Amino acid sequence: MQLPTQKSVQQDEAPQKIEKMKHVVRRIKFESELDLDFGERVAEKAYGQKLLSCIQCGTCSATCPLAHYMDYTPRKIIAMTREGFKEEVLNSLTIWLCASCYSCYVQCPRQIHITDVMYALKREAIQLGFHPKRLPIPILAQEFYKRVLKDGRNTESWLLISLYLRTNPFKMLKESILGLKLFLRGRLTIGKEHVKRRDQIHAILEHKKGGQPL
Amino acid sequence: MKYLSYPGCSLRSTGRAYEESIVAVFKALEIEYEELKDWNCCGATSYVSIDETDAFALAARNLALAELQVAEGTINLIAPCSACYLVLSKTERYLEDYPDVRTNVNAKLDKAGLHYNGRVEVRHPLDVLVNDYGLEKISKRVKYPLKGLKVASYYGCQVVRPFAKFDHSHYPVTMDKLVQALGAEPVDWPLKTRCCGGSLTGTTQEAGLRLNRLLLKEAQKRGADIMLTCCPLCQHNLECYQERINRIYQEEIDIPVAYFTQLIGVALGLSEKELGMQRLFKKPSLEKFMHPKGEMAHA
């Protein structure tokens, strides 16, 4: 997937600047347009009200190995969440690029569980249908969820096949050489792994036959 | 002390060599353990992105099964994959710290006739080998000290964070000490716990490959002959994408990436097959560093 870079944004803006000024666009929402409880709701789902006491020091953004690719840095996401910019936050790439390395989680001077905040935002974005439709990261999460719901275990080969089918089938061809190399070394299996007591998994996760949750 | 092992899904496919080498090394060192019966997926980082209580309950089924398998006392559950180690540790910790989580998760387990009482301690094989078994004992068992081999130990993120049970969260040294005990030389480098991108190499390659490129280049620049990992996904990312990274970024990266347990096995004199060396894309050439113990005095 091609991510927008700073350069492409600038190029995009320069020639159209004058045209754009004819139609001024308000970029910041008025308070009446915000979802003012959003921050508190997210805080509740991400272990504590500490989120609300963020001092905006930026340690999270500095330590984040993926901040270069994010549309809003983690610090901004926290600020926007707290202020109620719900749509912007749930539409952002940031929450999906978080790879759960917990670097910010352990360094935050206010002990905000930032990784848990990102997870809470991911759940909200999936539930409310906000995530970009063909972005592979949330689709991987959903396919993983389905695999495990069914068999209790994940089989990597089948997970990847279902991911590519839903996002970009051509990518499967691109990855086939790597797949073959892994297969020849016994590192990809065709048979599906599963637990014996599938009934226990289904009972715990309240799986109803025929009715997929997603 | 008796252990239960929780292999996890990755050790049954891309990380097979990790499981094989753990089995071989534990056998050689006579560390007794049993596999957790009918274990299920830990949920990794994906499950919690869909439903948190379900994610905790899924992981907690393993903890509950461990209590069924071992009737009394504290149970040391060994989870070699970083994601499994983190998820199981986190579940164990959050069940203890947050009464709401405990109530909700046990209500779900109840439906499957299970219950978790809090007797499990999740352990990483690196922690078990270094802190329970001990470096001195490992040193004594070494048959081929790996003299002169320069090793960059890569811990990845989720083994040391967020709970950092046995080492520092950003600059751990456990694996480096182990490397020394095997007679090899640890390379000091600052990226030991920087993220490899996890599943981003499969979903957002531009971001994923760059993270790996950085790690590989730095290890190579510091003169490492080999990189060691303690996670199946880190190993896969660092090893299998080297060709692609070289092509896209015009790099000349060429460094073998093995599991720390494979290197222990080599020093103990175990066979390549037992350690799953044939499954690596780049088999490290270690023969020139292997000096039988007796010869060391004369060398």
Image (tube, rainbow, N blue to C red):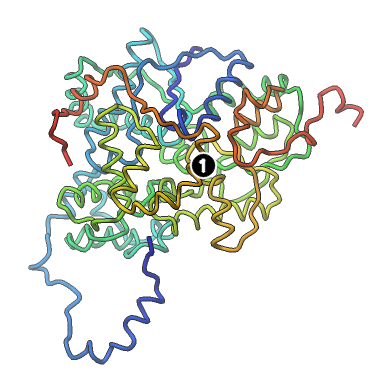
Q: Is residue A39 above or below residue B14?
A: below
Total tally of numbered discs in the picture: 1
Instruction: Residue at 22% x, 39% y: name it.
Output: B51
Residue B143 falls left or right of residue B236 = right
Residue A155 pos. (x, y %)? 37, 33
Q: Is residue B33 above or below residue B22?
A: above
Q: Which residue position is annotated with label 1?
A: B236
Q: Chain of mark 1?
A: B
Q: Is residue B45 above or below residue B78?
A: below
Q: Secondary structure at mark 1?
A: helix
Residue A47 falls left or right of residue B189 = left
Q: Quadrant of the C terminus of chain B?
A: top right
Q: Is residue B130 visible?
A: yes
Residue A43 pos. (x, y %)? 21, 48
Residue B28 falls left or right of residue B1 = right
Along the line of sight, the residue nearer the viewer: B248 or B209 = B248
- Mark 1 closeness class: few <14, some 14–19, many ≥20 residues within 10 Å: many
In this view, the residue farthest toward the top is: B71
In this view, the residue farthest toward the right is: B298
**Residue type (three-letter) at the residue carrying disc 1:** His
Along the line of sight, the residue nearer the viewer: A133 or B158 = A133
Instruction: Residue at 22% x, 57% y: name it.
Output: A90
Residue B175 falls left or right of residue B93 = right
Along the line of sight, the residue nearer the viewer: B117 or A173 = A173
Quarter of the rendering containing residue B151: top right
Residue B261 pos. (x, y %)? 60, 29
Quarter of the rendering containing residue B214: bottom right
Instruction: Residue at 32% x, 11% y: name it.
Output: B68
